[in-house]
């Protein structure tokens, strides 16, 4: 059976995601669609808007066959780390094809650019631009002379191919044309962006949300998503920012130096900025060409979750140590009988007994990420800890 991997966040799931899954089902009806999905924290460097358990269920209802959680150490990474961690999991699960949304579907061009990304001449140019204080993404775009790197999905596609060339050279690719503007915050597009949906959900009142979601969300998911919103089972980001702000005020420069991405003495500026009255004001004080908002958000998450440089270096070298099953359907149930290079975890409490030290650290960080996200839900009744341990993978017929 052909297996098609989709690396995703579904933050939240919307019509654009359903369109990709429907397109794959139409063209490859016998293929199994396996989603490698970010868990409780996403690549934006903050908690996902909804729990991974809800998002996994919506993915199955929207056309996926299996949903696997990408460990937090990778889901929080830069485009390169995110892509590499996900591709190594794709390889470990013997997935033979990868599909991704992209602003360009010229596969040969994408592959040619990806091959140049690790050339010595490109890396030299990259270092030169970085030394001028340019952000990583802008520096890479200039070094490669590739404008497609300015579009976020094409950039992730390039990172997938780049990692595939190294870790999974037989992997095939199916780019799907992305038609919506990733940064557009309006809900009026035919296939609105996740940015627009998050903006709607976090700023509008419940009645406005429920009416506007109808045009953006697949019908099988709509009532469930509306219920999660009206019951306050989604993240209040002001609560999370207060948490980061508090931690930043109580920590020392020596401790900050241990965490991922805290380099070049930025820990001193970080602690000075933490004296601002709000976390938004603090971030604006730190932000620069080199330290973009997205990078600072990830640094905030590394601080909050205690992710150190030492742990990340081991995770980069070794790759994912397990695949945590979140949801599946009948078709996916057959795939679960297959042997893989890493264990597929179904019972969270029993997982550490199957794992090495790195796997146990990943397990701890994933648990902590879920607990921190839960503390940020609007409804206090939903702020329960250790839900990872009580969760059973959802079988959706």
Image (tube, rainbow, N blue to C red):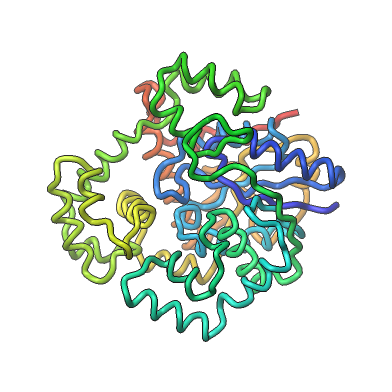
Q: Nearer the viewer, residue 186 or 317?
A: 186
**Residue furthest top as drawn:** 207
User: Is 221 situated left or right of 29 in this image?
Assistant: left
The residue at the point 38 percent across, 21 percent down is 381
Q: Is 247 left or right of 162, judged from the image as shown?
A: left
Q: Is residue 306 visible?
A: no
The structure residue drawn at horizontal position 40% and vertical position 32%, both measured from the top left corner, is 235
Image location (x, y in percent) of residue 283: 25, 50
- Picture mark count: 0
Q: Nearer the viewer, residue 300 or 347?
A: 300
Q: Quick one: 308 or 164, which is closer to the camera?
A: 164
Q: Position of residue 28 (x, y in %)?
A: 84, 47
In the visual, does 122 lie left or right of 396? Answer: left
Asked if residue 115 is positioned above or below residue 294 in the image, the reply reads below
In the rendered view, would you say 371 is above or below 263? above
Q: Quadrant of the C terminus?
A: top right
Give the vertical position of 45 relative to 355 (above or below).
above
Q: Position of residue 379 (x, y in %)?
A: 37, 22
Image quadrant where residue 272 sits: bottom left
Q: Position of residue 38 (x, y in %)?
A: 53, 47
**Quadrant of res 163:** bottom right
Could you tell whether 89 is left or right of 75 in the image?
A: right
Q: Is residue 326 visible?
A: yes
């Amino acid at each position: 059976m052909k297996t098609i991997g989709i690396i995703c966040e579904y933050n939240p799931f919307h019509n654009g995601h359903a369109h990709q899954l429907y397109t794959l089902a139409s063209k490859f009806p016998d293929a199994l669609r396996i989603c490698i999905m970010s868990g409780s924290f996403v690549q934006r460097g903050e908690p996902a808007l909804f729990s991974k358990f809800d998002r996994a269920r919506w993915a199955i209802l929207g056309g996926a066959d299996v949903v696997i959680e990408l460990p937090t150490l990778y889901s929080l990474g830069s485009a390169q780390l995110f892509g590499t961690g996900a591709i190594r999991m794709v390889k470990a699960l013997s997935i033979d094809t990868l599909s991704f949304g992209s602003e360009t579907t010229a596969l040969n061009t994408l592959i040619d650019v990806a091959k140049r990304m690790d050339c010595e001449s490109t890396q030299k140019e990259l270092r030169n631009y970085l030394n001028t204080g340019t952000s990583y993404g802008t520096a890479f775009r200039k070094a490669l002379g590739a404008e497609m790197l300015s579009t976020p999905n094409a950039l992730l596609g390039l990172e997938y191919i780049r990692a595939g060339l190294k870790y999974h050279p037989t992997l095939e690719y199916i780019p799907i044309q992305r038609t919506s503007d990733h940064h557009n915050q309006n809900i009026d597009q035919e296939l609105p962006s996740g940015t627009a949906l998050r903006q709607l959900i976090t700023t509008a009142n419940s009645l406005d949300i429920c009416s506007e979601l109808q045009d953006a969300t697949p019908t099988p998911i709509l009532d469930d998503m509306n219920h999660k919103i009206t019951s306050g089972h989604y993240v209040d980001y002001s609560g999370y920012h207060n948490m980061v702000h508090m931690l930043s005020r109580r920590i020392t420069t020596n401790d900050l130096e241990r965490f991922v991405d805290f380099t070049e003495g930025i820990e001193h500026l970080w602690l000075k900025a933490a004296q601002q009255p709000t976390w938004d004001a603090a971030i604006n004080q730190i932000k620069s060409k080199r330290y973009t908002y997205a990078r600072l958000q990830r640094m905030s998450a590394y601080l909050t979750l205690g992710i150190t440089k030492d742990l990340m270096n081991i995770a980069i070298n070794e790759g994912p140590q397990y695949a945590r099953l979140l949801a599946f359907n009948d078709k996916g149930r057959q795939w679960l009988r297959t042997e893989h290079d890493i264990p597929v975890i179904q019972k969270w409490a029993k997982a550490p007994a199957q794992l090495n030290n790195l796997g146990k650290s990943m397990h701890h960080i994933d648990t902590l990420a879920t607990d921190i996200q839960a503390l940020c839900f609007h409804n206090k009744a939903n702020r329960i800890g250790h839900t990872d341990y009580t969760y059973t993978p959802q079988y959706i017929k």
